[in-house]
Amino acid sequence: MALLGFMGVDELVVTVAPVAVYWVYSGIYEVLLRRTTVLDKYRLHSRRDEETKNIASRKDVVKGVLLQQAIQVAISVAVLKLTGDGDGAAADRAASLTPEPFLVVAARFGVAMLVLDAWQYFMHRLMHSSRYMYRRFHSWHHRVAAPYAFAAQYGHPVDGVLTETLSGAAAYLVSGMSPRAAAAFFVFATVKGVDDHCGVAAPWNPLHAAFGNNTAYHDVHHQRGGGRRNFSQPFFVVWDRLLGTHARYAVLPRDGGGLKVKIFEDQMH
């Protein structure tokens, strides 16, 4: 009850729901990929690839993600309090009495997606353009060369704050979303980020159908020779196309079963 006096229910959901959804959704992938074979024919990397190509251990990944999420929650609370959107029960009552029309909420959602994408593209590209920033911060994320679901948010805390957390804060502030709408938006963005790193290119996945920026697209970026291509995340590919960093690729059958992403030769520079 003391916590609800500090923040309203909506604000609590904004901070906690994305974290909970991250582990639940990535956990589903983990169970399906490690305990069953139902997704094996759609895997972009074999189990052996995960063991031999990834420098970061799974234990290190879990610890790194939890640290990043703790920082994310702290900054989220600070933003809510500074904007006056985290004033507990009063904010909950105001939100329930004055709901915005659906089209207004949808428009704010769209603005948030554009802001998040723009921030993450340019910060992500900067992390690769600066040798210092790449080696000191962003290289942590690329220690997972064969991506899997719960490694989506693995990285150096500084990289996580600059690329992920601050982009979320900017999307929230610029779009003017209510905490309730923001909770839905950040849950959606979290699911999308996990899906982009899951290493499974299932043709029936609705997120793959709706977005060109998907698991295969981001896998290009994690490949050797693809690190200066396909920076866009998590929704659209517009910045890559506009600024010449888009790499064309094909998803092909892999020897031994499963799939692989092949970058076209003229993109390998």
Image (cartoon, grey):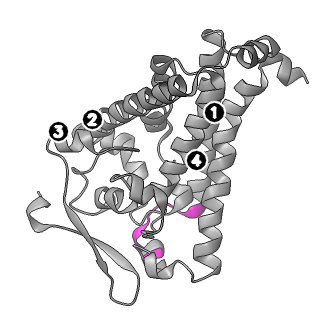
For label 1, the residue is 183
Residue 242, disc: 3
Cα distance in 3D space between marks 1 and 3 = 30 Å
Give the Cα distance between marks 1 and 4: 20 Å
Please name the amino acid that badge 2 sits on: Leu
Q: Image check: 143 left or right of 20?
A: left
Q: Which mark is residue 65?
A: 4
Q: Earlier in the sequence, mark 4 or mark 2?
A: 4
Decide which of tag 2 and tag 1 comes sooner along the chain.
2
Q: What residue did someone put label 2 on?
A: 126
Q: Tag 4: Cα neighbours inside 10 Å, few (<14), some, or many (≥20)?
A: many
Question: Which corner quadrant of the image does residue 184 belong to?
Answer: top right
Residue 257 in magenta stretch: no
Q: Position of residue 56 (x, y in %)?
A: 49, 60
Q: Residue at x 38, y 56 (%)?
A: 214
- Sequence-wise, the earlier of marks 3 and 2 is 2
* Quarter in which the N terminus is drawn: top right
Task: Choose between 225 and 239: the one closer to the eye.
Answer: 239
Give the camera-side residue of 99 and 269. Answer: 99
SS for dot 3: helix
Q: Contact (CB < 8 A) between labels 1 and 3?
A: no
